[in-house]
Image (cartoon, rainbow, N blue to C red):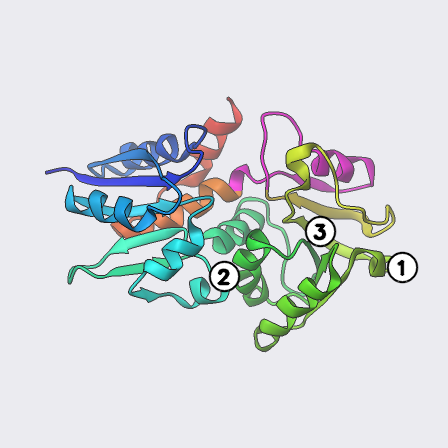
Amino acid sequence: MIDRYAVIGNPIEHSKSPLIHQAFAEQTGEKLEYDRILGRLGSFDQAVGKFLRQGGKGLNITVPFKEDAWRLADERSDRAETAGAVNTLILLPDGRLRGDNTDGVGLVNDLSQNHSCPLSGAEILLLGAGGATRGVLRPLLEANPKRLTIANRTASKASALATECATLGMVTGCGLEQLEGQEFDIIINGTAAGLAGEVPDIPGSILRLGGWIYDMMYSDTPTAFVRWGQNHGAGKALDGVGMLVEQAAESFYLWRGVRPDTSVVIRLLQSG
């Protein structure tokens, strides 16, 4: 029987994960099927159980079920523990479920490997203090930046998140209004403002000339935050399509033990 995988979320019809994983499978010669599952709120555990009984070997998890997956997992990786969320479930040989979070390593791999962005020694600003930010904190700090600042509209949320991760590196939290007078080499947007075509309320002088802008959101046209970067002297202004493919590649590796070539698939998505 062919190995089955899927992504579960709500909504789910927009997900590019099946396209990405089928491309990985064709490229590597791995025999598998990858589908979408529309999850019902309050019935996540049952949906996972049904999929596994039908021969499922692993799942990707998207909004709004990442915290449910974290609770369901029998064991979790360190990066999933820090994230408080799981985006990858792996069926172990003994029938238990291992939870992992590949979002952060997807972001770091896209920046460092695909774009040669110098994370080590950099001054990084991370906007937002929600799930997207929490999911990438540990891998970003493991890249050894000079300092990482979390800024959020509600300062207390940013400070609390920074305190939680204080043992992992030089990290502080503040409100957006406290950014005045500071400068950063890299600014990463982890807020949902872009979904409404908006940009977090940050000073226009905050990005060093030639610095990097990265929006975890992605779109067929430049996102509002990418446009903000282009208008404020960014040397590179990137959206999250590379992160999407890289986090998928890490999941694929965790399931299959094979690392696909992501560059081909990123170009495929960018070409529409």
Q: Earlier in the sequence, mark 1 or mark 2?
A: 2
Residue at label 1? 181
Q: Give amino acid for label 2.
A: Ala
The earlier-in-sequence mark between 3 and 2 is: 2
Of all residues, the one furthest to the right in this rendering is: 181
Q: Position of residue 14 (x, y in %)?
A: 45, 29
Q: Which residues are magenta?
A: 217-242
In what element is the residue under mark 1? loop
Quarter assignment of residue 225? top right
Could you tell whether 134 is left or right of 64 in the image? right
**Residue displayed at 62% across by 75% down:** 166
Mark 3 or mark 1: which comes first in sequence? 1
Q: Are marks 3 and 2 in contact (CB under 8 Å)?
A: no
Q: Who's the residue at 23% across and 36% down the image?
A: 29
Distance Cα–Cα, label 3 vs label 1? 15 Å
- Residue 213 on the magenta span: no
The nearer-to-camera label among 1 and 2 is 2
Residue assigned mark 3 = 187
> Looking at the image, can residue 98 be seen?
yes
Residue 214, located in which quarter of the rendered image?
top right
> How many residues crowd mark 2 within 10 Å: few (<14), some (14–19), many (20+)?
many
For the residue marked with disc 1, what is the amino acid? Gly
Name the kind of residue labelled 3 in the image. Answer: Ile
Residue furthest toward the top? 272
Number of residues whose C-alpha sits closer than 10 Å to that of mark 1, classed few (under 14), some (14–19) or many (20 or more)? few
Q: Residues within 10 Å of mark 3 (few under 14, many from 20)?
A: many
Residue 259 visible to an observer of this rendering:
no
The reply to whether discs 1 and 2 touch (Cβ–Cβ < 8 Å) is no
Question: What is the x, y in percent for residue 217?
Answer: 59, 39
- Residue 136 position, x and y percent, is 55, 57
Residue assigned mark 2: 83
